[in-house]
């Protein structure tokens, strides 16, 4: 029996060495990504414990006093709780509803273009805004929407209407944010669907043509079913990040006139944590937001698994 076990261990070791020899370069390529997620995604999870303590910067995490769910109760009883949750959810929901279909539509349109030079030009132009920083994007918004010299208001005044201070109208904040998000990221997100389109069998289009299907029927019956798995996966991920609104852009677009609709969980965490030094309270709010996102993504994945064969797990 001992000789058999030694033989098994030897064979297992040899198999491991063979796999290592065949895959070592791929492992080295993957190593930076692994280190990134360990250092910036898993190690910071240790900070969750701060939300259950009365954290003192001088005492450190372990020496600070345990307070249990004190800061969670404090947040739930806060008069800002419902406003922050509502603003964050609505902004995330509008972004999901309007931003999610945009790259799909652009990918379908680009797939119909037969002039390759024009197609590459459109792709390049649509990709470029993704690489513009949020500071520059918000600066462009302020410039274009300025009530005095903005190009949008110049057009409005030419049409005989009064200039509108868009950036100071709280009812317009969400629309401006969502539209700027679509413009900034639609081209980049189209890459996923263009890659999925390359996997659609061209023979299916030929069969559809023989059956008399026009371009629209081919899109509905061939193209969309072909990229459906990619659409479902991206949708599940987007549903799981409804409350995960980017802090930088919202913070840069905020001003006292729009706080009623612009103040969201991430901006409140910034003011509470870094602004007021209440790290325990800020951590509790951030963890609450992450738990809600977890519930959303689990629910979306469960529904997708029940209704189709595609899911994250």
Image (tube, helix red, strand yellow):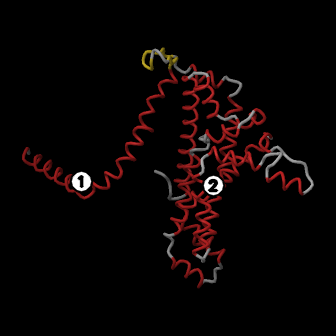
Residue 15 vertical placement versus 265 (above, below):
below
Secondary element under disc 2, as helix, strand or loop, is loop
Q: Is residue 302 left or right of residue 219?
A: left
Can you name the residue that lies furthest to the bottom here?
210
Q: Would residue 210 appear left or right of 6 to someone viewing this image?
A: right
Count of numbered badges drawn on the protein: 2
Whole-percent x, y for residue 44 in the image: 45, 33
| Mark 2 Cα shell of 10 Å, populated few (<14), some (14-19), many (≥20) | some
Mark seen at residue 100:
2
Q: Nearer the viewer, residue 203 or 248?
A: 248
Q: Position of residue 181 (x, y in %)?
A: 65, 50
Image position of 276 with respect to 204: above or below:
above
Residue ID at (21%, 52%):
16
Quarter of the image where the N terminus is located: top left
Relative image position of residue 203 (x, y in whole percent): 51, 79
Q: Nearer the viewer, residue 105 or 271?
A: 271
201 relative position to 213: left or right: left
Q: Whole-percent x and y of residue 299?
A: 56, 45
Q: Residue at x 45, y 15 (%)?
A: 59
Which residue is painted at 53% across and 40% down in the image? Answer: 294
Q: Residue furthest right?
A: 160
In which quarter of the view is residue 280 placed?
top right
Q: Residue 3, labelled with which disc?
A: none
Q: Which residue is mark 1?
A: 20
Identify the residue at image location x=68%, y=29%: 81
The answer to whether the residues at label 2 and label 1 have Cβ atoms under 8 Å apart is no
Q: CA distance from mark 2 to mark 1?
A: 41 Å
How many residues crowd around disc 1 within 10 Å: few (fewer than 14), some, or many (20 or more)?
Answer: few
- Pick the residue in front: 192 or 226: 192
Can you say whether 210 is above or below 106 in the image?
A: below
Q: Secondary structure at mark 1?
A: helix
Task: Name which of mark 2 and mark 1 comes first in the sequence.
Answer: 1
């Amino acid at each position: 029996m001992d000789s058999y076990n030694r033989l098994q261990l030897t064979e297992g070791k040899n198999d491991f060495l063979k796999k290592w020899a065949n895959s070592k370069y791929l492992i080295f390529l993957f190593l930076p990504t692994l280190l990134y997620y360990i250092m910036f995604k898993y190690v910071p999870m240790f900070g969750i414990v701060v939300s259950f303590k009365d954290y003192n910067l001088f005492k450190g995490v372990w020496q600070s006093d345990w307070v249990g769910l004190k800061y969670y109760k404090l947040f739930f009883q806060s008069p800002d709780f419902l406003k922050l949750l509502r603003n964050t959810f609505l902004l995330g929901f509008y972004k999901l509803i309007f931003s999610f279909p945009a790259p799909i539509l652009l990918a379908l349109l680009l797939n119909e273009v037969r002039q390759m030079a024009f197609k590459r030009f459109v792709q390049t132009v649509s990709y470029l805004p993704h690489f513009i920083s949020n500071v520059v994007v918000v600066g462009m918004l302020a410039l274009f929407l300025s009530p005095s010299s903005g190009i949008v208001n110049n057009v409005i005044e030419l049409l005989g209407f009064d200039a509108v201070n868009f950036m100071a109208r709280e009812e317009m904040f969400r629309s401006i944010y969502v539209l700027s998000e679509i413009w900034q990221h639609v081209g980049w997100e189209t890459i996923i669907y263009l890659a999925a389109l390359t996997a659609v069998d061209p023979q299916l289009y030929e069969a559809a043509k023989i059956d008399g299907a026009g371009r629209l029927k081919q899109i509905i019956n061939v193209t969309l079913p072909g990229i459906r798995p990619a659409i479902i996966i991206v949708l599940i991920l987007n549903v799981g990040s409804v409350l995960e609104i980017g802090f930088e852009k919202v913070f840069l677009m905020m001003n006292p006139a729009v706080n009623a609709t612009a103040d969201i969980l991430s901006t409140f965490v910034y003011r509470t944590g870094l602004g007021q030094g209440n790290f325990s309270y800020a951590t509790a709010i951030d963890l609450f937001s992450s738990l809600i996102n977890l519930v959303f993504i689990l629910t979306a994945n469960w529904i997708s698994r029940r209704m189709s064969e595609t899911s994250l797990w």
